[in-house]
Image (tube, grey):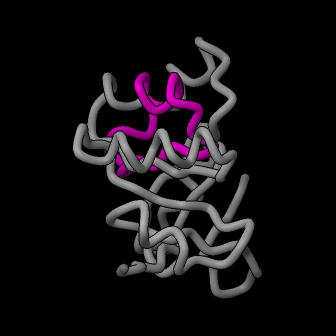
């Protein structure tokens, strides 16, 4: 299980950007994080064309499928969608890793039993402005 933002385990950070210009304010080899939205397709396509690792936060099954088709490295979901997201990723052999956004360490055990790829604490997502 991958752990991002856990206090015991060093990990990479994800950089939440609001536009393409914000990407220039992130360290090289960053993971760019965006919410899935039609308004963010320019950022998603820019990341894809420039081979920038991409994390997409999804709210629905349809968005999860889109994120995988858009070559996301990570698909971030909330706990209530974790089981369905994990099943879909396994059934369709996604390359993307399913990460569940959590706030409490106590959530790790149940998510591990579901077989999700990993968890991400909100402190691992750094907001970047232009």
Q: Is residue 78 magenta?
A: yes
Corner quadrant of residue 41: top left
Is 22 on the left or on the right of 60, as rendered?
A: right
Position of residue 94 relative to residue 123, above or below, is above
Spot occupied by residue 106 in the image (x, y as percentages of width and height): 50, 69
Is 17 on the left or on the right of 75, as rendered?
A: left
Count of numbered marks: 0
Q: Nearer the viewer, residue 15 or 18?
A: 18
Is 20 on the left or on the right of 3, as rendered?
A: left
Q: Nearer the viewer, residue 102 or 31?
A: 31
Q: Is residue 70 magenta?
A: yes
Spot occupied by residue 115 in the image (x, y as percentages of width and height): 64, 38
Q: Which residues are magenta?
A: 65-85
* Quadrant placement of the C terminus: bottom left
Position of residue 96 relative to residue 79, above or below, is above
Spot occupied by residue 63 in the image (x, y as percentages of width and height): 33, 30
The residue depicted at 28 percent of the width and 41 percent of the height is: 59
Position of residue 119 relative to residue 70, above or below, is below
């Amino acid at each position: 299980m991958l752990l991002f933002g856990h206090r015991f385990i060093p990990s990479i950070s994800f950089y939440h950007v609001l536009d393409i210009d914000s990407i220039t304010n992130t360290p090289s080899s960053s993971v760019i994080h965006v919410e899935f939205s039609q308004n963010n397709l320019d950022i998603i396509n820019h990341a894809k064309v420039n081979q920038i690792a991409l994390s997409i936060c999804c709210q629905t099954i349809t968005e999860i499928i889109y994120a995988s088709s858009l070559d996301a490295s990570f698909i971030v979901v909330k706990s209530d969608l974790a089981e369905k997201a994990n099943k879909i990723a396994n059934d369709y052999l996604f390359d993307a890793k399913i990460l569940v956004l959590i706030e409490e360490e106590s959530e790790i055990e149940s998510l591990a039993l579901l077989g999700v790829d990993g968890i991400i604490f909100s402190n691992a997502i750094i907001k970047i402005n232009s």
